[in-house]
Image (cartoon, rainbow, N blue to C red):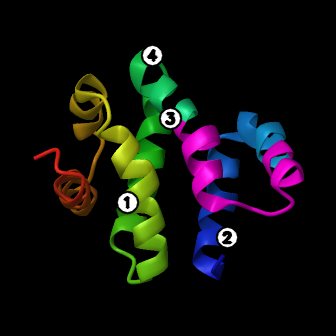
């Protein structure tokens, strides 16, 4: 795992502190940090839940502002991990994708379209 991905995971733990125990359990279970597993199985269900409930709008705005910064990063590994975990999962459900568009920045939206194209969704 590269340094920027490590920073990303720490930031997600900061934004979603309720995921700390599951994060630690994943590391114990796999004897290492499996970044895609942690993002897909721990962080994204929490983000999807927030999007469905639309209760904590401020947190969603903060998360997607952070995601816009990630989308504009030049680290190829980080962008790849972000695209194949966060963006692909957001595209799995059309209603979630519609709900999330209002939070996405320009670059995040562009990467989402690219992720859907890569999967043959569009």
Q: Earlier in the sequence, mark 4 or mark 1?
A: 4
On the image, which quarter does residue 110 sit in? bottom left
Task: Classify 10 Å Cα crowding around label 1: few (below 14), some (14-19), many (20 and above).
Answer: many
SS of the residue under disc 4: helix
Q: CA distance from mark 1 to mark 2?
A: 16 Å
Nearest the eye: 49 or 77: 77
Residue highlighted by disc 1: 83
**Callout 1–callout 3 Cβ contact below 8 Å:** no
Q: CA distance from mark 4 to mark 2?
A: 29 Å
Residue highlighted by disc 3: 47
Secondary structure that dominates the magenta span: helix
Determine the residue positioned at 32% across, 35% down.
92
Q: Which residues are magenta?
A: 25-44
Residue highlighted by disc 2: 6
Determine the residue positioned at 35% across, 60% down.
68
Q: Earlier in the sequence, mark 4 or mark 3?
A: 3
């Amino acid at each position: 795992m590269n340094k920027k991905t490590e920073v990303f995971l720490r930031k997600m733990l900061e934004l979603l502190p309720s995921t700390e125990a599951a994060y630690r359990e994943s590391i114990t279970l796999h004897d290492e940090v499996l970044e895609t597993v942690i993002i897909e199985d721990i962080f994204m269900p929490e983000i999807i839940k927030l999007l469905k409930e639309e209760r904590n709008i401020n947190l969603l705005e903060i998360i997607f502002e952070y995601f816009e910064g990630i989308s504009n990063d030049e680290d190829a590994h980080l962008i790849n991990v972000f695209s194949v975990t966060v963006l692909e999962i957001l595209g799995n459900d059309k209603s979630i994708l519609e709900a999330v568009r209002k939070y996405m920045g320009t670059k995040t939206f562009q990467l989402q379209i690219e992720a859907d194209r890569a999967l043959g969704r569009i």
